Each structure stands twice: as C-alpha cells, then as structure tokens.
Amino acid sequence: MERTQKVKKSYRPSLLVVLGIILVLTMIAQLAFLSIFGTRGKEVASIRRKQKELILENELLEAEMSRRQSLVYIKKVATEELGMVNVGEIEYISENSTLSAANGQEQ
C-alpha cells in the first residue's frame, strides 16, 4: 500500500511549479503586449509631430494667400511686373499732333 501512494505523489506537480509556469506565461504575455503597443506609441508621437508641422505650414500658406489676394499686392504686381498702368496715367496722342525729335514736346 505504501508503494502505490509514493507513485501517486511523484506524478503530482507541486504548487511552486504551477505558479512558476503561470509566472513565466504572464511575463511572456506582458513582453508581447509591450512590444506591440510600445512601437505604436512611437508611431503616434511621430504622426502627431508631423501633424503639428503641417498645421504650421498650413497657417503660413493661408497668410501668404491672404497677402497675395490683397489689392495692394495685386496693384504692385500689375504695375511693376506686368507693366500695366492705372486708368488716370494713360497718355493719349492725337493724330494731329507730332512730336519734335529735338526737344520731345508736342507741336
């Protein structure tokens, strides 16, 4: 009878072995969780940094667009770069008048 009891005891896992296995599995699960979500945190930080850069660039472009749509800027480009003149600045020469080549005055 004693012999059969010894055999049964030897096949029972001890409580420490079971707790050790649970601890190891928990640690493996935690490492897997951290590796998956740890890299996601870096990606999120990178995306947020890029978002801030794009918001700043967008604000600068909107300011430039407002400046270029102003009448002062349009008039400056029209007169200086495109050679246009204001309505009151046009000089007309009649068919009857001739210019003197010597002094540049009308006769």
Image: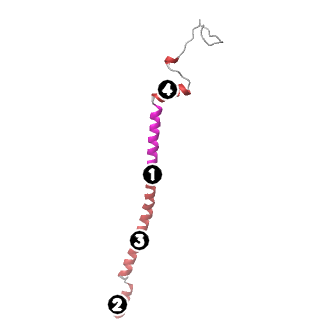
For badge 3, the amino acid type reads: Met
In three-dimensional space, the C-alpha distance between marks 4 and 1, rounded to whole angstroms, equals: 39 Å
The residue at 54%/27% (across/down) is 80
Q: Earlier in the sequence, mark 4 or mark 1?
A: 1
Q: Earlier in the sequence, mark 2 or mark 4?
A: 2
In three-dimensional space, the C-alpha distance between marks 3 and 2, rounded to whole angstroms, equals: 36 Å
In three-dimensional space, the C-alpha distance between marks 3 and 4, rounded to whole angstroms, equals: 71 Å
Residue 13 spot, x, y in % from top left:
37, 82
For badge 2, the amino acid type reads: Gln
The circle on residue 49 is 1
**Which residue is more in the foreground, 101 or 96?**
101
In three-dimensional space, the C-alpha distance between marks 1 and 2, rounded to whole angstroms, equals: 68 Å
Whether 75 is among the magenta residues is no
Q: Element type at marker 3?
A: helix
The circle on residue 27 is 3
Residue at the disc numbered 2: 5
Quick one: which residue is furthest to the top in this view? 96
The residue at 46%/47% (across/down) is 53
Position above or below: 34 against 91: below
Bin the neighbour count of mark 4 within 10 Å (Cα to Cα): few under 14, some 14-19, many 20 and up.
some
Q: Earlier in the sequence, mark 3 or mark 2?
A: 2
The residue at 64%/10% (across/down) is 100
Residue at the disc numbered 4: 75
Magenta residues span 48-69
Quick one: which residue is furthest to the right in this view? 102
Please give the count of numbered marks on the rendered protein: 4
For badge 1, the amino acid type reads: Arg
